[in-house]
């Protein structure tokens, strides 16, 4: 589908220019300069020849077929250019020109018109407002970037053209090879979706890198990313993730969720390796492009300096990499080949006067240990250090089948060694922490590849009941469902809820409490009061009719005083659940990905502690297990200091049921079940309180 962009036999440049400094000149200059072997057709009605090539007044005057058109003319002329492309049978078009939706209303209208016209003709567009693309395999540099990277196995796509130029300059300066460079621009037609799909099957690409500021089809993006990540590493930087949502959130979940949380959840579920910086992006890329995946998380460190070795060991703990425990046999072999003052455990310290032969013995011995899944070789240049010989040894050792990364620290003394390492496919990092972090990214990806495809659970539910409740609220022009309604909704999806009845007077409350059995909990019931505790609308542990009657009067008067305009239905009298751990599960609707599930320890402090995790619904059991274990307070659910472990299996099922509910009813835009009490193992979960907002 995209072959016309990456393997064209002929290229026309609409807006080619003879004048240096103009974009139209830079593009045709790059195509010619870097040896594109196909036919090149400059199009400029004011020139008969450009760079020794015959120039044509328009596309229709060119004889022969044209696979790719690169358009760099003022926006007002581009609609006519698209018409010419259609008449000429051109199906692939790059629009370099700016002046579209990035400029506001009129530009947005023009961009929509251009995209619609191209779509009607069956033409695919890259851009507008983009840098262009580079394909080293076909020797095509259809961009106005300065330089051409060497051939390699890394593909890079970006929404930022300026970032493309900076990274391209870095690639050229550091001799890092790329297969493709693609600037997405405004994504009027082609987006990251099509590129990920194409690059996943591209034999010239082994690692896919991307810079994203946003996606428009979140679920489709996740599906394509998951398919691609099963074939090759997909590493992405997501920018602009710290902005809060434009809409003020009313639920705990809505308050705690945000654009970045949603992207992180989507990346985790899709197997995308998220880089938190441009530095991370290329650190990771170098490891993935040059080294095999580790079979486990155990890293060995070989160093000639104690300080950097300790720093690397600290980084292992920080990035959740295990320090390999060397076998007795390995330690004995190290004792035979290293000086008595060396460090024989992990990190292995070959001492500052180590020459290349000592490194060779240590590296080969450590890599042969079955307890070791990968190694980091640290070198600080000292007077007796054989820097380049050591680099040769490390490059040769990288054929062991285990990932080997290097941190040759310094600048002037190690330049030659870094070139040797690069040619051997060994990534070198100026600081050991970056090497450990890159190894950690490989470990996580290798673990994800071993996981089965997610299976989405399905449970019996009373959908008709939920439809009726939502319809009733709409009929009354209400978007907030009160506690009673929300409890009925989750009950319809299999959640167990405590006994509860509505009371409209203090006497009625006492009668209801007697029927339920003491002690009881009482809560204000109002569609307008979402956070009941904040208005004094909750009383717990009420053990007699007198306490219940008194509590009724206090609750209703508190609510009336603090929220005088709220509609008060009465007070809900509920069975009190005495044991179990309180958690919160909830959902808020993300504009990119849809329903975003949240899990954390429950209660009134959830927004303060922020000990929560997120996933995009629908979600499978494995992702839910990871979601639960990610929170810092997870050990409390496992049982501490003699406490019985909580029923985590029932909690997993509860989150699966919630996932099904919000997937079945996309009109639910926010909801919390807080608290959801997780009883001891084998006893299930009970949903104490719930609230819900619909579109």
Image (tube, grey):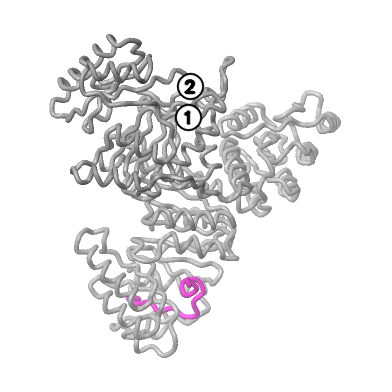
Image disc number at residue 685: 1
Q: In the image, 185: left or right of 560?
A: right
Residue at 66 percent across and 52 percent down: it is 425
Let me know if residue 543 appears in the view.
yes
> Quick one: SS at disc 1?
strand
Query: Viewer-proximal residue, 304 or 68?
Result: 68
Residue 151, given in percent of the width and then of the height, sits at: 58, 63
How far from the left and from the top, in percent, is residue 529? 23, 29
- In the rendered view, does 411 fall on the left or right side of 72? right
Identify the magenta region. Answer: 1-17
Q: Position of residue 646 (x, y in %)?
A: 54, 25
Q: Nearer the viewer, residue 667 or 515?
A: 515
Residue 100 vertical placement versus 675 (above, below): below
Compared to residue 588, the image places residue 345 above or below, namely above
Q: Is residue 4 magenta?
A: yes
Residue receiving disc 2: 580
In front of the other: 655 or 22: 655
Residue neighbourhood size for the residue with mark 1, other residues' Cα within 10 Å, grouped as few (<14), some (14–19), many (≥20) = many
Q: Farthest residue to the left: give it.
A: 565
Tell me if label 2 and label 1 are in contact, CB under 8 Å. yes
The residue shown at (51%, 65%) is: 198
Specify the quadrant of the image occupied by residue 130: bottom left
Q: CA distance from mark 2 to mark 1?
A: 8 Å
**Alpha-carbon neighbours of circle 2 within 10 Å: few (<14), some, or many (≥20)?**
many
Q: Residue at x 38, y 14 (%)?
A: 519
Give the secondary structure at mark 2. Answer: loop
Counting residues from the start of the chain, the first of labels 2 and 1 encountered is 2
Name the residue at 44% across, 17% down.
Answer: 578
Is 313 positioned to the left or the right of 551 in the image? Answer: right
């Amino acid at each position: 589908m995209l072959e016309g962009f990456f393997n064209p036999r002929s290229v026309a440049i609409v807006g080619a220019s003879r004048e240096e400094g103009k974009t139209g000149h830079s593009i045709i200059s790059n195509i010619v300069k870097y040896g594109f072997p196909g036919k090149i057709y400059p199009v400029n009605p004011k020139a008969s020849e450009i760079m020794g090539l015959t120039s044509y007044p328009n596309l229709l005057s060119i004889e022969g077929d044209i696979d790719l058109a690169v358009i760099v003319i003022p926006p007002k002329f581009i609609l006519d250019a698209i018409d010419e492309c259609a008449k000429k049978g051109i199906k692939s078009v790059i629009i370099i020109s700016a002046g579209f939706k990035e400029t506001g209303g009129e530009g947005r209208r023009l961009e929509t018109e251009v995209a619609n016209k191209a779509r009607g003709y069956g033409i695919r567009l890259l851009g507008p407002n983009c840098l262009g693309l580079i394909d080293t395999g076909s020797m095509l540099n259809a961009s106005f970037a300065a330089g051409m990277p060497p051939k390699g196995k890394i593909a890079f796509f970006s929404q930022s053209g300026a970032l493309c130029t900076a990274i391209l300059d870095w690639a050229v300066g550091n001799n890092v090879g790329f297969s493709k460079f693609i600037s997405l621009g405004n994504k009027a037609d082609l987006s990251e979706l099509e590129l990920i799909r194409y690059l996943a099957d591209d034999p010239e690409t082994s690692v896919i890198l991307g810079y994203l500021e946003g996606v428009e089809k979140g679920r489709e993006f996740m599906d394509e990313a998951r398919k691609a990540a099963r074939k090759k590493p997909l590493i992405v930087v997501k920018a602009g993730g710290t902005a809060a949502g434009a809409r003020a959130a009313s639920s705990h979940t809505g308050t705690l969720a945000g654009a970045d949380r949603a992207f992180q959840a989507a990346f985790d579920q899709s197997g995308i390796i998220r880089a938190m910086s441009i530095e991370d992006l290329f650190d990771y890329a170098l490891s993935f492009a040059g080294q095999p995946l580790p079979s486990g998380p155990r890293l060995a460190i070989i160093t000639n300096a104690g300080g950097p070795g300790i720093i690397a060991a600290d980084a292992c703990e920080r990035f959740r990499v295990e320090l390999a425990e060397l076998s007795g046999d390995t330690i004995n072999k190290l004792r035979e080949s290293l000086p008595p003052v060396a460090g024989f455990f992990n990190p292995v310290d070959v001492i500052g006067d180590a020459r290349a032969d000592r490194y060779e013995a240590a590296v080969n011995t450590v890599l042969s240990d079955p307890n070791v899944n990968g190694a980091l070789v640290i070198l600080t240049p000292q007077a007796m250090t054989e820097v380049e010989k050591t680099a040769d040894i490390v490059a040769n050792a990288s054929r062991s089948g285990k990932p080997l990364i290097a941190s040759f620290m310094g600048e002037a003394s190690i330049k030659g060694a870094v070139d040797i390492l690069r040619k051997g496919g060994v990534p070198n990092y100026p600081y050991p922490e970056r090497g450990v972090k890159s190894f950690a990214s490989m470990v996580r990806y290798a673990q994800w590849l071993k996981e089965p495809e997610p299976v989405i659970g399905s449970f019996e539910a009373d959908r008709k009941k939920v439809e009726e409740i939502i319809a009733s609220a709409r009929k009354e022009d209400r978007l907030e469902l009160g506690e009673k309604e929300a409890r009925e909704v989750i009950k319809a999806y299999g959640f167990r809820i405590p006994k509860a009845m509505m009371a409209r007077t203090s006497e009625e409350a006492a009668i209801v409490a007697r029927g339920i059995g003491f002690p009881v909990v009482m809560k204000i019931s109002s569609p307008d009061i979402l956070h009941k505790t904040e208005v004094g609308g909750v009383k717990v542990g009420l053990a007699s009719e007198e306490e219940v009657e008194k509590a009724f009067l206090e609750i209703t008067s508190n609510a009336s005083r603090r929220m005088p305009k709220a509609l008060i239905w009465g007070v809900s009298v509920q069975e009190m659940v005495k044991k179990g751990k309180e958690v919160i599960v909830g959902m808020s609707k993300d504009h990119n990905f849809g329903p975003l599930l949240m899990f954390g320890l429950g209660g009134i402090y959830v927004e303060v502690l922020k000990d929560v995790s997120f996933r995009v619904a629908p979600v499978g059991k494995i992702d839910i297990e990871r979601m639960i274990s990610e929170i810092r307070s997870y050990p409390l659910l496992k049982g501490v200091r003699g406490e019985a472990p909580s029923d985590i299996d029932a909690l997993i099922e509860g989150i699966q049921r919630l996932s099904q509910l919000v997937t079945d009813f996309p009109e639910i835009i926010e909801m919390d079940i807080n608290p959801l009490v997780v009883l001891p193992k084998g006893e299930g979960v009970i949903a104490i309180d719930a609230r819900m907002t619909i579109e």
